[in-house]
Amino acid sequence: MQAILFDMDGVILEGPRTDPQVYADATSYALSELGIDPASEQREAFRGFDTDIITDHAATHGIDPDEFWQLKDYRASELTHERVRSGERGVYDDVEVLPELAERTTTALVTNNRHRTAEFVGDHFEFGFESVRGRDPSMDGYQRRKPDPYYLDETLDELGVDGGLYVGDSGVDITAGQNADLETAFVRRSHNRSTELPAEPDYELESLTELLDLLETAGSR
Ligand SMILES: [Mg+2]
């Protein structure tokens, strides 16, 4: 197997996604940096990710939507890194296998989460990823997230490989992996026990440690 690429949320970091409170706080920060104080209904919309609605509301308040987006993205990353550093947001026990996998093959991180946070996780835990990629801090970057294979394709190019395995915890990961012509593995965790998948993954894993065997089998084929 040329490479193993990992999703981040729900595979490495505990829980399927960033806590909504992080985006609520990041939104308050960004709005106050830009000097506006919208009513609660509009504030709610700014917390979300609907780029059309955010662009409309930004126009109403005379702020640059991209600048808002970037500030919110930046702050959400800072807040997330704090939560990870303090242990408030943990990692799964089986991530201890990642350095060993990195010794045996090329590993990388490709997530729909923010690029800054992907970089932070790569640096903070020393899992041995050769490449890390998250979504760019812009509305365009948000649109390129999985199931679009954009960030997966870019990572494969960077690694100089044309195949491998993508390990994820959601249907979108399986679709994106297939869109990038990768084999796919679905990790069952407590949050996705009963998730139904849009497409059949090549493997289902109960633990990331099973990747060692899988790598061995693939190597001897
Ligand atoms: Mg995930």
Image (spheres, rainbow, N blue to C red):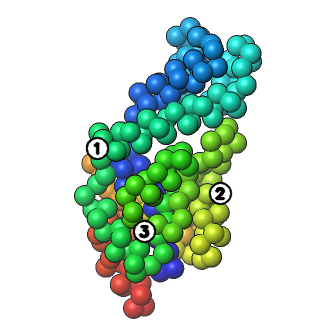
Residue type beneath disc 1: Gly
Residue most toward the top?
A: 39
Q: Can residue 57 be seen?
A: yes
What is the distance, in whole Å, between disc 3 and disc 2 at their CAs? 23 Å
Residue type beneath disc 3: Gly
What is the quadrant of the C terminus in the image? bottom left
Identify residue for label 3: 128
Identify residue for label 1: 87
Identify residue for label 2: 150
Q: Which of these two is toward me, 98 or 81?
A: 81
Write down the quadrant of residue 81 in the picture.
top left
What is the distance, in whole Å, between disc 1 and disc 3 at their CAs? 20 Å
Q: Can residue 166 be seen?
A: no
Q: Is residue 81 above or below residue 110?
A: above
Q: Earlier in the sequence, mark 1 or mark 3?
A: 1
Q: Secondary structure at mark 1?
A: loop
Question: Closer to the camera: disc 3 or disc 2?
Answer: 3
Give the image location of residue 108, x and y in percent. 49, 65
